[in-house]
Amino acid sequence: MKTGQQFISLAVWLIVCFAAAGVGSLFTPGEWYVTLRKPAWTPPGYLFGPVWTLLYALMGTAAWLIWIRFGFADARTALTLFILQLILNAAWSWIFFGLHKPGVAFFELLLLWVAILATVIAFWQKRADAGALLLPYLAWVTFAAVLNYAIWRLNGGGR
């Protein structure tokens, strides 16, 4: 693949990732979230934008590394898992912030976590550097799942 094509394909993968971010951002915390009881260790709101920007950039780069070496035909499973986890990623915001369903969002987040782990493994088998780029995302979603669970429980969920 020529250098120009590589940069175009990187841009496409970044656009795909940030499109998922855009869908998720349609559902903002809002007044409902402000009224929820949250653990003391909840990160401040201003932290989420920069963290997610970095994570989406790493995700797009990881997918691009797979794409430029293998294309879709030779990395069908890995890239399909990647797209699946992006869909689940965007769906969480809709469920949690849009529908105000922290319990359902927690279980959806568990599905997302499994999808990310499967993607990490599939990417790692193709290119270790691509799999490694997804590890911060897996770590953040692990933290998010614990936080989501705590918020759900603090607000009467699971009883």
Image: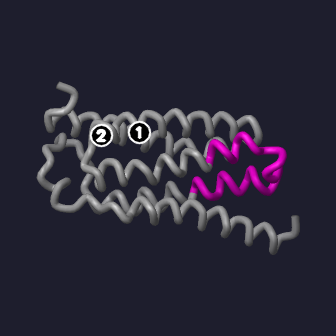
| Label 2, residues with CA under 10 Å away: few <14, some 14-19, many ≥20 | many
Q: Nearer the viewer, residue 9 or 136?
A: 9
Q: What stretch is highlighted in magenta?
A: 58-82
- For this orientation, the residue located farthest to the right is 1
In terms of secondary structure, where does tag 2 sit? helix
What residue did someone put label 2 on?
A: 148
Residue type indicated by callout 1: Leu
In the image, taking residue 40 as reference, residue 124 lies left or right, namely right
The numbered mark, 2 or 1, whose residue comes first in the sequence reads: 1
**Image quadrant in which you'd find residue 110:** top left
- For this orientation, the residue located farthest to the bottom is 4
- For this orientation, the residue located farthest to the top is 159
Q: Nearer the viewer, residue 95 or 47?
A: 95
Q: Where residue 35 appears, x then y in whole percent? A: 12, 52
Q: Is residue 49 above or below residue 148?
A: below
Badges 2 and 1: C-beta atoms under 8 Å apart? yes
What residue did someone put label 1 on?
A: 109
Q: Nearer the viewer, residue 27 or 122?
A: 27
| Label 1, residues with CA under 10 Å away: few <14, some 14-19, many ≥20 | many
Q: Where residue 20 appears, x then y in whole percent? A: 51, 60
Does the segment drawn in magenta span residue 76? yes
Q: Residue at 13% across / 44% down in the picture? A: 37
In the image, taking residue 32 as reference, residue 89 lies left or right, namely right
Q: Where residue 140 appears, x then y in whole percent? A: 43, 44
The quadrant of the picture occupied by the N terminus is: bottom right
Q: Residue at 63% across / 42% down in the picture? A: 81
Does the segment drawn in magenta span residue 48? no
